Amino acid sequence: MPNPPQSPGSFRPRGLPPLLPWQPCLVAYAAGILGVAHFLPACCALGLLALFPRPAPGSTRPVALILAFGLGLAAGSWAMPAPPKNPPPCVEGTSPVTARGTVAEVDPRPEGRLAVVLDAVRLSGQGCPDAPLGSRLAVTIDHPAFTPLPGDVLAVTGRMRSTAGFANPGTTDFAFLRRLDGIFFRTYARGDRNQVARLESGRNPPARWRLALQAQVAKALTLPPVPTQETRPDGSTAAPGAEADAAPMPASAATPGRPPAASPAALAGRPEPDAAARAGRAMIPALLFDDKSGFTEADLDLVRRASLAHTLALSGMNVGYVAAMAVALTMLAGTFFPGIYLRLARPRLVVLVAAPLVAAYCWLGGASPSLVRAALMFAAFGLMLLLGRDKALFDGLFLALAAFLLVSPLSAFSASLQLSVLAVAGIAALWPLYSRWADRLPGPGPVRTGLAWSLGILWTSVTAEAAVLPLLTRLFGDLPFNPWINLLWLPVLGAVVMPLLLTGAALVAVPGLETAGSLLLTLAADCCAWLMRLLAGLDAGGLLVSRPVLRPWWPEMLGCYGLLAVLAMVVAGRSRPLAATAASLVLLIAPTAWRLVEDARPTVSLTVLDVGQGQSAAVTLPGGRRLLIDAGGLFGSFDVGRAVVGPSLTDGRPPRIDRAMASHPHSDHVKGFLWLLGGFDIGAWHDNGASPEGALGPALDAALARRGIPRQSLADGDSIDLGHGLALAVLHPGPGDDRTGNNGSLILRLTQNGHGLALFPGDAETGVLRRLAAAGRDLRAEVLLLPHHGSSSSLTQRFYAAVAPKIAIASAGDSGHYPSAKVVEALKRLSCPTLATNRHGAVTVRFDATGRISDVDARRQPNDPAVLPDGLSGLLSATPGKHH
């Protein structure tokens, strides 16, 4: 971040420097790397880049851009880790096995969890007599008994699973993100149940010194224990999304079991009354050691909704604070020894003073990838200053990016790197506009300087957030745009908290100065607690604006960034790139036109989302109207509504649900609605009349009342007219049925002009299904969403025969129990193939105007004969490549 000037006179108009000949080639090279996974978007980005004018003599020619793109494509393909060819058979079994491996990475997660990556893994147990895994292993450790260090050798006992999961159209591909790190399998273990043991201690003195210092800081702060939730020992519904390095949203890396009753405030994501003091103390290890284990998910969500998550990410902003301390030290030295500036210019002196401080901070933060990248960016900026470049920020950005992509081509896929580069580019490109305006600020010198600094911070925040906005909305699906809070947060964090905690951490390590260090750390924690109370107060007043938004498709993102580049050129006073402007506008507008055409078609589609061990089905009707039947929900803090269902529904679509329907009140069907009710526009709510147990019921009731959403309880005989000949008939429950359990599920039949499209039986079990079939009701449907996730407790041949489905779909997690082999075999006898979300990801079925199935799209491995059910090859081949 460019430092605001020390005097108003230092604001001078500065234009955006022309790109050096190699810099556009670097952008093309990066596009080529991204083309390994996103070839068409990367090619369009290359074409858009070629349309921008090249004003400098000797500028890059189009052929050079194409060659750079090809080089990036080759580098990315070469660096991409290959999946293990013959993994041991026990990795997908239901029995626990023991993995022995060397710790490569340790990442403390909220609520006391650890995410550990093991190298050189060997498995032992049933079916695996000391077999090599052939892949790195991601381990989530809940309630850890000790903190492992890189180099340690661990033995971890748990069920092995692939990293595939939550495979939904238009959402983050978590398995691909883990593949970038060479990780293809994961497991879950409890440290307090002797499932993790340290076999050997590694020789890593820097890591041990860091751990010892962390213990001293914790002792000085007397950190309280972090509240955690009871978890299922086998982690049977683990959430792979939380294992992604970029982590688009806060999520547990394992799915905990049924927790003790939480308060409505906790369920709604609001901190408890004493949360500010605890979170304030938790900020100290987070800012020093990148250790967020003292936070709850609610704490981090509060910070994120205030647009301040970057301040806790230990990346460029935090390195900027350390560099600012170097500026202050340099100015202090110049005050007492003014002659020092005669020996070395102040900018160069700042770089030399800051370099060891940044290196030390990088060690403190555990040399995380984001922190290392930020330190390398600082080194590149510093090098440009030492070389006398007047465009140090801009040139340093390209130099650092070149280093990242040449050493580690796959870092191009890192969301944190993408956000950092875009933020710095936005600041550098639009700073000249503020620089010109700031020169005309009124008032005496000190007033102008103070005003310039304050407005400069705000301008920097706005330009950085504007630059990352398209990518943020794509990654997260909601928009926390509150840059004004930076005026309150950043000065305290940068000028008060960081100096206190860095100085305090240094003092507690010196014998005899522990008391002074503890005092400084406590003062820093109190300041952080004040900041968290400030956020809680703003949240209580409704001032933390964060709403789900349409997640743009890649053409819209390219169009946005093309227009931002055009704006930067206009601000710099350079020629207006008309061709690039026109192309960017076409890219921005074309997807909207396409969606309008799609919505005008009289077709219906059904998507059974991959929500783990739960259920959620979205029905898209003519005109773009949507029904959502159930919203999933896993035990613990992982929010399926926010992390999975919401992003799926906002992929190229506004956050709108015409009718939300809860089949029955079990949390694996309704918990995901809680987040959706807080931000989506929902036309109506339908349920079976029963309320979820514990705090979830009151929280749902409060959300419905707060938003004023009409609600209706449905029963047998009800029917909802959906227009265009479509109707949703309710077949169960009747007046005397208990609606609190599985057998109280709404059984819904979607029809078009009387023809059955899909049947949704919820979790209804065998007795209810047999009774329904024996009653002679018309149950026929093209698609059957298998009752109770495909469990054998809902197996009834008579019911299947009455429905006569062409396709059956099971919504299930990776526990290994669903769908039941007996259910699959019973349907096979009726020539009905079965797809399951735990093997195929999200499944989309499209119907033509007559209500017949036109095609089926499975998100994961639809063309793999090993997982493709008999009878689906023709339908799936009608949509080749859509799963990608």
Image (cartoon, grey):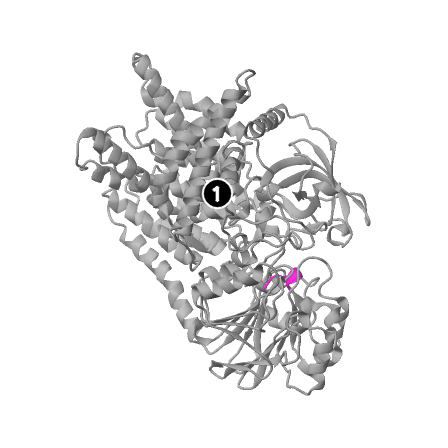
Residue 25 in picture, x, y percent from top left: 41, 41
Say if residue 61 shows up in the picture.
no
The amino acid type of the residue labelled 1 equals Ser
Residue at 33% across, 49% down: 564
Q: Is residue 838 magenta?
A: yes
The vertical placement of 712 against 370, above or below, is below
Tell me which segment is drawn in magenta. Answer: 837-842
Q: Secondary structure at mark 1?
A: helix
Residue at 64% across, 32% down: 150
The vertical placement of 272 against 386, above or below, is below
Pointer 1 local density, CA inside 10 Å: few below 14, some 14–19, many at least 20: many
From the image, which quarter does the C terminus lie in?
bottom right
Q: Nearer the viewer, residue 195 or 387?
A: 195
From the image, which quarter does the N terminus lie in?
top left
Q: Nearer the viewer, residue 195 or 219?
A: 219
Residue at 47% across, 60% down: 678
Q: Is residue 171 magenta?
A: no
Q: Nearer the viewer, residue 316 or 575?
A: 316
The vertical placement of 729 against 253, above or below, is below
Residue 348 in picture, x, y percent from top left: 35, 21
Say if residue 549 shows up in the picture.
yes
Q: Main structural element of the magenta stretch: helix, strand or loop?
A: helix
Residue at 66% across, 34% down: 148
Q: Residue furthest front?
A: 273
Q: Is residue 28 left or right of residue 193?
A: left
Residue 468 in picture, x, y percent from top left: 40, 47
**What residue would you read off at disc 1?**
416
Residue 593 in picture, x, y percent from top left: 38, 67
